[in-house]
Image (cartoon, rainbow, N blue to C red):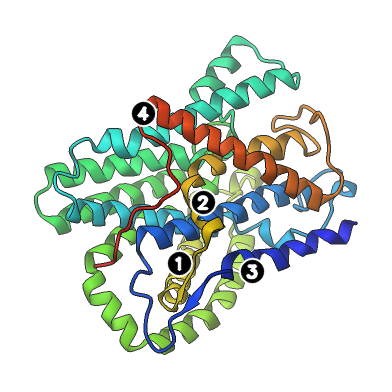
Amino acid sequence: MKQAIYLVYVALPVILLWGAKFSGKRFNDGFLSLEQTKAIQGFLAICIMLHHIAQKTCASWIQPQTRIVHGLDMFVPIGYLLVSIFLFFNGYGVYKSYHTKENYLDGFIKKRILPVVLALYTTTVIFFIARLLVGEKMDAKQVILYLTSIQLCNPNTWYVIVLPFFYLAFYFSFKFIKKDGLAVLATTAFVVFYMLLGTRIDHNDYWIRGEWWYNCVFLFPVGIIFAKFEDKIIPHLKKHYWVYLVAALLLFYPLYIYSGFICNIFGYYGDNWGAPDTVFRRRVSLLSQVFLTTEFVFTVLLINMKVAFGNKFLKFMGTITLEFYLIHGLYVELFGWQFDGGVPSPHHIKYVLVYVLVVFALGVPSAILLKKLHGFILHKPYTITPHSRKAA
């Protein structure tokens, strides 16, 4: 039964490739359409679920090590790679929308930022209630820290905390800077400043807890820059497509190994070692992961230029990606060995495949309910029909 978890590696290609269409000698001109990018994000949401379950079942830091059950090992270290694609699409999407939708910045905060903040705090309240029910003891200070999300009540919310700040940087840059190139530069500078700030902060229990808070965020301005110059980039990529694709595929694994080597040698945890050059170590490690995440997203885009991914299931998952991303972790915690923070989980599921299926089976309807709740609050009806956004 323990070996059954390897069926995941059969199911994932089926989910991704079911209904996919290869363009042959032509190109998938809708490879950056909203429908296509949402389908990809729907698939990535499932992979991120597996990443979080892997951290609970087979990560090297699990103690005692007798608890480790192998099977999802490849998902343990790749969470930041998966989120890098989300950030690229976030940056690409806001820039394209700014240039294609009239008066896009009017109501930007309500349309772009408020839904993310709302999703953060609705799931924070849900996790807070769950923590009380599983018996976590809290004083008044801890209650305030959790409910404000200064300390993460939902341990998977770093992405929805930093994203609104990047959106705000984009908003203020493009609202008050008239030259497009300077606005792009200002947004990029903000993200770089955030990354440099992150490398100066030791691992902690609050915001910017560790490297996962900033090691893939550079893809947000990369998405913006790609959108700005796509009229030149895409024809160039098409002209030399096979050269770029082969190079990207051949380069990824060596670059992945190299980044792992750099992080092992320099590391993000110099604060634990008492190293005098901790910030320098973090920045060297960060730079290796910036190269890796950029190359990874580039590879995904190249494949996407030839293969149109999408089926009814992925389209459906694409409509609840944010909610599923935020709520599935509740079930990861409830059915693992212990709830985040150290309280024993109420029910540990021994077999990892069953664990995966239960988390997914409960996470999807919970995400739908959250989506409907958010739509009710924001007066935005829930729909599973994606809109279209063609690449220019």
Do we see residue 202 in this rendering?
A: no
Q: Which of marks 1 and 3 is nearer the N terminus?
A: 3
Helix, strand or loop at disc 1? helix
- Residue placed most toward the observer, 316 or 325: 316
> Is residue 314 positioned above or below 213 on the image?
below
Graded by Cα atoms within 10 Å as few (under 14), some (14 to 19) or many (20 or more), the crowding at tag 2 reads some
**Kind of residue indicated by mark 1:** Val
Which quarter of the rendered picture does the C terminus lie within? bottom left
Which quarter of the rendered picture does the N terminus lie within? bottom right
Q: Residue at x 48, y 27 (%)?
A: 121
| Mark 1 touches mark 3? (CB < 8 Å) | no
Mark nearest the camera among 2 and 1 is: 2
User: Which circle marks residue 316 in the picture?
Assistant: 2
**Kind of residue indicated by mark 3:** Pro
Graded by Cα atoms within 10 Å as few (under 14), some (14 to 19) or many (20 or more), the crowding at tag 1 reads many
The residue to which callout 1 is attached is: 297
Q: Which of marks 4 and 3 is nearer the N terminus?
A: 3
| Mark 3 touches mark 2? (CB < 8 Å) | no
Please indicate whether residue 310 sits to the left or right of residue 230 in the image.
Answer: right
**Cα distance in 3D space between marks 1 and 4:** 32 Å
Which residue is situated farthest in the top direction here? 140
The residue to which callout 4 is attached is: 378
Graded by Cα atoms within 10 Å as few (under 14), some (14 to 19) or many (20 or more), the crowding at tag 3 reads few
**Kind of residue indicated by mark 4:** Leu
Helix, strand or loop at disc 3? helix
The residue to which callout 3 is attached is: 13
Q: Residue 266: x and y, percent?
A: 58, 59
**Kind of residue indicated by mark 2:** Phe
Q: In which quarter of the image is residue 243?
A: bottom left
